[in-house]
Image: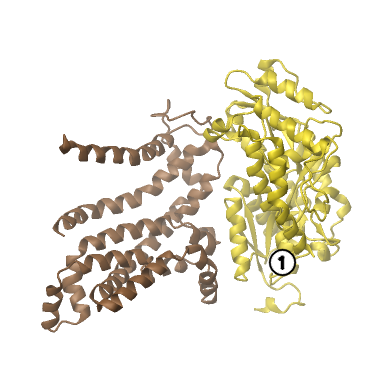
Amino acid sequence: MAACTGNAAPTANSITLQVSGEREETAVYRAIVTAYENDNPGIEVKLIEVADRDDHLTKLATSYAVGDPPDVFLINFREYSQFVVRGAITPFEGYVDDAGIDLAEYYPAPIEAFTYQDALQCMPQNVSSLVVYYNTDLFERAGVEEPNAGWTWEDFRATGETLTQGDVRGIGIEPSVIRLAPFVWSNGGEIVDDLDEPSAFTLDTPEAREALEFLVSLAHDGLMPTEKELAAQDLVTRFITSKVAMFLSSRREAPEFREVRGLNWDVGPLPIADEEVGILHSDGYCISSLSKDPDAAADLVAYAAGQQGQTLAALGGRTVPSLIAVAQSGAFLNPTQAPARSEVFLDAIPNLLRTPVIPTWPEIEDLAHEILTRAFYEPGYTIDDAIEALRAETGGLFAEGVDQLQ
Amino acid sequence: MKRWIRPLGIVIACGLFVLPLLFMLTGSLRIPGLPPPDGFEWLPDQVRWANYSSVFGFVSLWSYMVNSLIVVAIAVPITVLVASWAGFAIATARPRVQKTLIVVSLIALMVPLSALWIPRFVLFKWLGFTDTLVPLIAPALMATTPFYVLIFALVYARIPKPLYEAARLEGLSPMAIWRRVAFPLGRAAAFAVAVLAFAWHWANFIDPLMYLSSEERFTVPLALRALQSLEPTNHSILLAGAVIATVPPVIAFLIVQRAFFVRALDA
């Protein structure tokens, strides 16, 4: 194949792009691919759609193992590190200028998250953050005020208490690090000792401890669904069936909630302790280092993460655009579609913090999820038990992860 | 008293297996977009058959079905043939060889499939068969799983030795003995393995996930996985898809079940 002759102009005319998501969600990427092919006759983009996120990672890992990965794939910044340290990604840094991309036009938080050793690795397509989804009907019925900027933990708890009536629980929060972190930060604490080279969780500081205690108390005081209730129906299901009034999540729920008949909902900012702070969620397009035609791959990435691509993605409702102009356009802030308060996502962007980017982070998150679940729901399992378990069980993974970075 | 313990046990066991199927059926008739029911729902208030046509709007299920049918149409006969040959070889081998072959089969049975993903993928990539149905069918050349070989070996070993001896004395080749003695007498095993292999290939999820990247070659399990990722309010669509996907294996079973039970009684 002529494509193998590295330095020649792009000659291969077929690029593969692997994404994950359900068919409605991936419709956005089909639209982007079609638009790209129309603008670039002679280039064929093959879209590989994997329904499930875990299947997506399995398929990626296997295709890398046999030396046949897709040219481009979309992945969360919390998961891309394992590919970077194995040299599996061609940094996008080298293509930024040629592609005519001005990084200043993008929100800095996701760009920073995808930067490793001073080089931009993958091109972020979105910048989401944690917000409070709330059921406006339940709010109206309980006669409580909708969440507003600057509302405090106490307001949040009081609202949750009022909303908890009959089979309705006021609050739904997953017991995970990425839900806990913004509460810790807002209270002036940290979740790890060093963001770049973390060696341990730091949830034993008074600030962090207080945040964990706050969340756990919401579960213990019956403001959140019990473990049994969640075993029957998960949080998303309980929210769309009006059994949970407030539900913390990122932008990803929006397209789904829009489809639910009879559900009236909106989004509000996270409650704060001291500081207004949010947590970054972002996916980026990465170019495989085994791509036979990285130039053509980079061209596709520039398009998908550029004006046209992000506009198409924003219209799908699933993403908060990382390109500032698109984020502030009607494609995203469309007032005729729920949520009415989409600007809540944009208001959070200046104060976004992120979790560490190390190859073992996904495993650390999995472990922490188990431990936090016990802290939320297991009688007799104390905050101290949880903090100690987090320290003891994740230490090795932190060391291993940082080790791989070098 | 004792007489109806057995039927009662059978009824209870059947009930346990039928309940989820029933739930699948009633769930598939719920109006999509409505909140999921709180518990078991015998029949939704409003029955909606249109869910079955909606499935085809979400995934190209027909094309997936055709691909799956191509796979089973080729893989099942090959599996039966190869497994029965191998089983016959084990059943008629000398005792020491027989023991070794059984141990080898058991060891092969215990190798986790996930340990073979990458070597297999490398092999099929080298042969240029990725993104085709070949890797999904190829295991049939090795009887799909050693378990099927062992089923045949067990059945053929129970055929009285003198029958084989007599055939041999008549000058029949091993192939002819298999064709004229073992296979006809062990027919029930062939039907059983055919049904099992049908279900195995029909439900195979991980191989199509790994090897296929073009949607036009996807098989049924990938369609169900895609429907599974729909939101909970649309799970009636998933269940409708599941009902459709269950029909072909059920038909396959119904076709062979009579022969299967009759022959089993003979044996």
- Would residue A346 be seen by someone viewing this image from the given angle? no
Which chain hosts label 1?
A
Tell me if A43 is positioned left or right of B6 in this view: right
Q: Colour of chain A?
A: yellow
Q: Colour of chain B?
A: brown
Front residue of A388 and A326: A388
- On screen, residue B7 above or below B110: above
Which quarter of the rendering shows the N terminus of chain B? top left
Residue A223 x, y percent position in the rendering: 66, 25
Three-letter amino acid code at disc 1? Arg
The quadrant holding residue A151 is top right
Q: Residue at x 21, y 56 (%)?
A: B260
Tell me if B121 is positioned left or right of B157 in this view: right
Residue B53 x, y percent position in the rendering: 44, 42
Q: Residue at x 14, y 58 (%)?
A: B266
Q: Residue at x 72, y 79 (%)?
A: A5
Which quarter of the rendering shows the C terminus of chain B? bottom left
Front residue of A10 and B36: B36
- Residue projecting furthest to the right: A104
Tell me if A75 is positioned left or right of B123 in this view: right
Q: Residue at x 87, y 56 (%)?
A: A102
Instruction: Determine whether the residue tagged by mark 1 lies in a helix, strand or loop.
Output: loop
The quadrant holding residue B109 is bottom left
Residue A357 x, y percent position in the rendering: 77, 54
- Would residue B59 be seen by someone viewing this image from the given angle? yes
- Residue projecting furthest to the bottom: B171
- The residue under label 1 is A86
Residue B173 x, y percent position in the rendering: 19, 82
- On screen, residue B81 above or below A76: below
Front residue of A104 and A174: A174
